[in-house]
Image: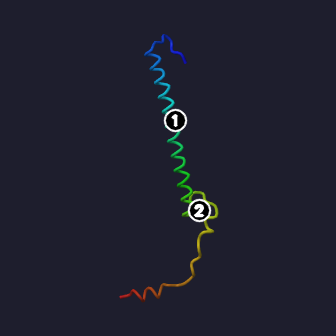
Amino acid sequence: MPVGGGGAITEVLSSIGRISELMFEGHWYAFSKAVESLAQGSLRLNQNLWGSMGGGVGGSSLRGSSPSREYGKQIESKFAK
């Protein structure tokens, strides 16, 4: 884009402005991609660790079943003073 009443200084400043704008946009794009990748990685970790957290499908399939046993009296008598 030509600048009206151009001179050497005006052309240099215009070029610096265009380069700065491209660098800013490039850095912002790279930063946003890094944040997006971090968010996706965190979501995958949450799905792998906790199953149903973070919109995971089939989270209950990873859970084991606890034996139905009564520990109440055994523990009370063992630790009673």
Q: Amino acid at mark 1?
A: Gly
Query: Which image quarter is the C terminus in?
Result: bottom left
Residue 39 image point, x, y percent: 53, 51
Mark closer to the observer (1, 2): 1
Distance (Cα) linking label 1 and label 2:
36 Å
Q: Are the two marked residues, 1 and 2, in contact with CB atoms closer than 8 angstroms?
A: no
65 vs 71, left or right, is right
- What residue is drawn where x is 59% and y is 62%? 52
- Answer above or below: position of 41 versus 64: above
Residue behind mark 2: 52
Q: Residue 67: x percent and y percent?
A: 57, 81
Q: How many marks?
A: 2
Q: Which residue is mark 1?
A: 26
User: Which tag, 1 or 2, sits closer to the chain's start?
Assistant: 1
Residue kind at label 2, given as amino acid type:
Ser
Q: In the displayed structure, does residue 55 sit left or right of residue 35?
A: right
Q: Which mark is drawn over residue 80?
A: none
Residue 66 x/y as whole percent: 57, 78
**Quadrant containing the N terminus in the rendered view:** top right
Q: Which residue is at a point 48% across and 10% down the rendered structure image?
A: 5
Decide which of 67, 13 is in the foreground and name it: 13
Q: Residue at x 48, y 22 (%)?
A: 15
Residue 6 x/y as whole percent: 48, 12
SS of the residue under disc 1: helix
Describe residue 17's horizontal placement relative to residue 61 as left or right: left
Rendered residue at 53%/55% (across/down): 42
Q: Considering only vertical position in the picture, is 6 above or below 42?
A: above
Give the quadrant of residue 69: bottom right
Q: Residues within 10 Å of mark 2 (few under 14, many from 20)?
A: some
Q: Outermost residue, top direction?
A: 5
Give SS at disc 2: loop
36 in relation to 4, above or below: below
